[in-house]
Image (cartoon, helix red, strand yellow):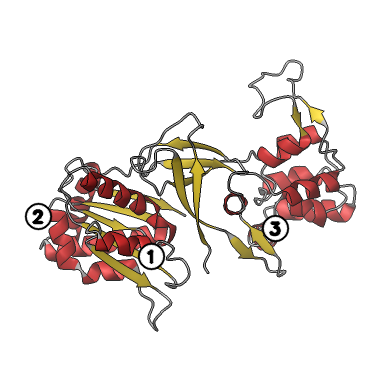
Amino acid sequence: NGSTVHVEIDISKAGFDYTTADNLGVMPLNDAKVVESVAASLGYDLDAVFSVKAAPDHEWHGAPFPMPITIRECLERYCDLTSAPRRSDLKLLALYASDPTDRKALTRLSSKEGKKEYKEKVTDSYVGLVDLFKLCPSLSIPLAHLLKISRRQLPRYYTISSSSSVHPDTVHLTAVVTRERRPDGSTFDGVCSTHLAGLVSSRDTVRVFNRPSTFRLPKDTTRPILMVGPGTGVAPMRALLQERSYLKSKGSKLGMNVLYFGCKKSNEDYIYKDEMEQYQRDGILDKLYLAFSREQREKVYVQHLLSKNAVETWRLLDADKGSVYVCGGVKMGHDVTEALKEIVSTQGQMSFDDAKDYLARLATDGRFVQELWA
């Protein structure tokens, strides 16, 4: 019922492998309707094929896409058509408006005086190039100039939610499908998450690559791990639990595994409920602490539960030499860090500054690992 989706990508023929809880870069595609709207606004023939070459006396660094290429593929794969354009971009776009009203509006939004209006009408309204071309219909831009103004489509990174030992030929992702309500009542759909959620099994392909993450299990399997991963931050924790389960099946003795998970409501985004309960029954997940923030009068978050378990947390950290993994939003990461500082300070009977240094040493030793996003 929520916005979280589980995606599995077959990489058996992709030519790369991955390590448990690596990051996966996904190159998104603009929706066909977005591409067709831009083409209709600017009068482009989407099936036309083109190549790019350097102008005389200009240094050539190569094109950011393969050539020859159709306009459709270029707009679909390589141009950011939905993110809010920068104010400097609006200043350039104003030069291509034949209607004085459109030109004046774009110039005003790009000015220092129009900064507040830009935030309200562009950034906060999720207005991208595709929308601007409809709002300012007199814009007429040659393809070569659009390619210079438009930013390149960038990869989106997701922490892999699978173990490479258990799933060597597939990569699992846990993603939130971004849907934001605009002030005018329309909906903005996130490019990459919508693309992933719309993939059809056994038919569609997706462009991906991997890069190392900082989530690595302790080499000594008897050391405990404490995982804090609310929302989609549970992704690497799921991967680590799969890996710990695999290690146990091969005869390794495991230290304690503790997970803190939270979301707004248990019947919405707790998509791994059955898996986590099975890990508990199998003796893999020793402690599971759940915070469903909207299911009681006072909001409860993972950091609140962590503070309640101060004695246990301190024992895992200090006496048992455990590792802490935190994944999720920046604010949550800050609140969890503050809760840990308080626990270390009170339970370890040290000053707050000493507690801060204690956590810094854990981080240096690879025992306090965070991957956070804005």
Q: Are marks 1 and 3 in contact (CB under 8 Å)?
A: no
Left or right, residue 104 beside residue 206: right
Q: Is residue 118 above or below residue 289?
A: above
Residue at the spot x=60%, y=40% of the render? 205
The image shows residue 326 at horizontal and vertical percentages of 33, 54
Q: Quadrant of residue 127?
A: bottom right
Give the CA separation, mark 1 to mark 3: 48 Å
Question: To which residue does mark 3 refer?
Answer: 114
The numbered disc on residue 273 is 1
The numbered disc on residue 319 is 2
Q: Earlier in the sequence, mark 1 or mark 3?
A: 3
Give the CA separation, mark 1 to mark 2: 31 Å
The residue most toward the right is 99
Which residue occupies the foreground of this view, 68 or 354? 68
Q: Name the amino acid, label 1.
A: Lys
Residue at the spot x=33%, y=67% of the render? 302
Disc 2 packing (10 Å; few <14; some 14–19; many ≥20): few
Q: Quadrant of residue 49?
A: top right
| Dot 1: element | helix
The image shows residue 186 at horizontal and vertical percentages of 71, 66
Disc 3 packing (10 Å; few <14; some 14–19; many ≥20): some
Mark 1 or 3, which is nearer the eye? 1
Which residue occupies the foreground of this view, 156 or 146? 156
Mark 3 or 2, which is nearer the eye? 2
> How many numbered dots are placed on residues in this image?
3
Q: Are marks 1 and 2 in contact (CB under 8 Å)?
A: no
The residue most toward the top is 57
Left or right, residue 163 beside residue 218: right
